[in-house]
Image: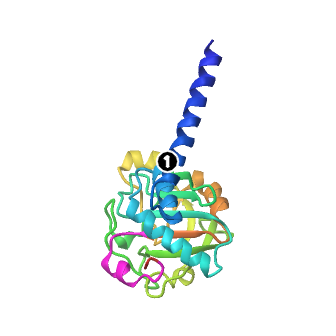
Amino acid sequence: MFTLLAFFVSQSLENLYSTSNIIIEQKENFSPDQVKIEKLTQSAPNLNKEVIKLALRAYKRAFEQGKVKNTMLTIIDFSVPSNQNRLWIFDMQKDALVLKTYVAHGENSGSGTVPYHFSNEMWGKESSLGTYITENTYDGHNGYSLNLEGLEEDLNSNAYKRRVVVHGAWYVEPSFIKKAGRAGCSWGCPAVAASLAKSIINLIKNGSVLFAYYPDSYFLSHSKYTVE
């Protein structure tokens, strides 16, 4: 009896999900991009829809330039406090959320939970905004790490030379965040929990888009990847 009930519940949930997708696709005057935005928003309701729109523009521009080899899209919203999930990874072929987690910001971007200053300077120890393409992996000082290529001049183009990479860190572990009330700060790298680093890096390595956002006026007016 219990097994039968569980089956009907699972079928109902599956039908509900399928129906919601059909409703999204059938809305009048919805372009393919709008359908994609609705699906991504549905899979990550806590992520600002406007940020999703900007990230999708950046993804499309990078794709048109032939830079996308891995169809995962990573979105970081630095306007969200560091003691909350503010990194989302989407599978753009399925328009579905794969993972959400914590991520650090640079120590000179702000010592609180929300950064407020961003830079492309070589020794700034600050986070950089904009569109990146993931590159190859390596084992370094911070263990298994992922190189990033910053695509935006004056915003993140020095990322590789600055050694801004994705790596694991103890100060982004949920246990540390729970105790300290915030994630620790990096030297500008989007560091993730050490316990998740390998799986995250393997998921997004080799040609996926990483988009780092904050409602910064200079970023919003100078990014060539988020314009319509």
Q: Is residue 218 magenta?
A: yes
Quarter of image, res 203: bottom right
The relative height of residue 80 versus residue 23 in the rendered view (above or below) is: below
Badge 1, how many Cα within 10 Å: few under 14, some, many 20+? few
8 vs 118, nearest the viewer:
8
On the rendered structure, is 206 left or right of 9?
right
The relative height of residue 121 versus residue 178 in the rendered view (above or below) is: below
The relative height of residue 39 versus residue 148 in the rendered view (above or below) is: above
Q: Is the image coloured rainbow, by chain, by secondary structure, or in one colour?
A: rainbow
Q: Position of residue 52 (x, y in %)?
A: 45, 63
On the rendered structure, is 119 left or right of 9?
left
Q: Is residue 158 magenta?
A: no
- Could you tell me if residue 73 is visible in this image? yes
Quadrant (top left/top right/bottom left/bottom right) for the C terminus = bottom left
Quadrant (top left/top right/bottom left/bottom right) for the N terminus = top right
Task: Please tell me which residue is depicted at 56% across the width and 57% down the height of the picture.
Answer: 90
Residue placed farthest to the front in the image?
28
Task: Please tell me which residue is depicted at 63% across the width and 63% down the height of the picture.
Answer: 204
Q: Position of residue 123 (x, y in %)?
A: 45, 83
Q: Position of residue 26 (x, y in %)?
A: 51, 52
The residue stretch that appears in magenta: 213-225
Tell me the SS state at disc 1: helix
Residue placed farthest to the bottom in the image?
153
Look at label 1 and name its amino acid. Ile
Quarter of image, res 10: top right
Q: Which residue is mark 1?
A: 23
